[in-house]
Amino acid sequence: MKARSTARFSHLTLCVAVSALALAACSKKAPEQSSADTMPAEVAATPEAPAAPAAAAPAAAAPAPDNVDTLTGVKLAAYTGDAAKGKTAFVACQTCHAVEAGVNKIGPSLHAVVGRKAGTIAGFNYSAANKNSGITWTPEKLFQYLEGPQRIVPGTKMIFPGFPDPQKRADVIAYLQANS
């Protein structure tokens, strides 16, 4: 009986140890010590010239307003959008957007978006990036935009990552066109 109890305790101890290791591996790393903390005192006390400010990484330039090239090279013309499927895909958008005229949410109404110049709904607080993008929302431009909004309008307030599936983008555009 005592041997069985000892074996169970050993298994329990092993499980707890493995769990602790797994949690430690998944948790955030402790902040690393600064180099001054690990240097010998005489080296750490040596005055240094101020470091030059790090160069800011250049923001990726947005494609030109009339450029409709996608990252994958696919074109909207290669797809036939299905408005019914687009309505289903639009569920991901409806928290922030409505298709009814005059109904702005976190994002502007998408009623009659096709053919509209970006940033032009009166009373909606657009980002400067969107307002000054020069974009007119053609079906092709929407197709490109829905692939990765931040690539097309860097600085947009829209945090949606996009629809990687080109068929889904075509379906959403068909839904938007049907509800305009």
Image (cartoon, grey):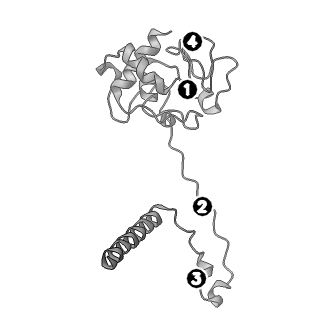
Numbered label attached to residue 54: 2
**Cβ–Cβ under 8 Å for marks 3 and 4:** no
Q: Position of residue 98 (x, y in %)?
A: 56, 18
Is the residue 171 above or below the residue 64 in the image? above
Callout in the foreground (4, 1): 1
**How many angstroms separate mark 4 from mark 1 (CA)?**
13 Å
Numbered label attached to residue 95: 1
**How many angstroms separate mark 4 from mark 2 (CA)?**
47 Å
Callout 3 environment at 10 Å: few (<14), some (14 to 19), or many (20+)?
few
Look at 55% across and 26% down and name the residue there. Answer: 95
Q: Quadrant of residue 21?
A: bottom left
4 or 2: tag closer to the N-terminus = 2
**Cβ–Cβ under 8 Å for marks 1 and 3:** no
Callout in the foreground (1, 3): 1
Q: Is residue 51 left or right of residue 139?
A: right
Q: Position of residue 113 (x, y in %)?
A: 53, 16
Q: Position of residue 153 (x, y in %)?
A: 53, 33
Callout 2 environment at 10 Å: few (<14), some (14 to 19), or many (20+)?
few
Callout in the foreground (1, 2): 1
The one of 42 and 165 positioned closer to us in this rendering: 165
The one of 17 and 55 positioned closer to us in this rendering: 17
Callout in the foreground (4, 2): 4
2 or 3: tag closer to the N-terminus = 3
Identified by mark 3, the residue type is: Thr
**Cβ–Cβ under 8 Å for marks 2 and 3:** no
Numbered label attached to residue 100: 4
Q: Quadrant of residue 1?
A: bottom left
The one of 94 and 109 positioned closer to us in this rendering: 94
Label 4 sits on a secondary structure element that is loop
The one of 121 and 88 positioned closer to us in this rendering: 88
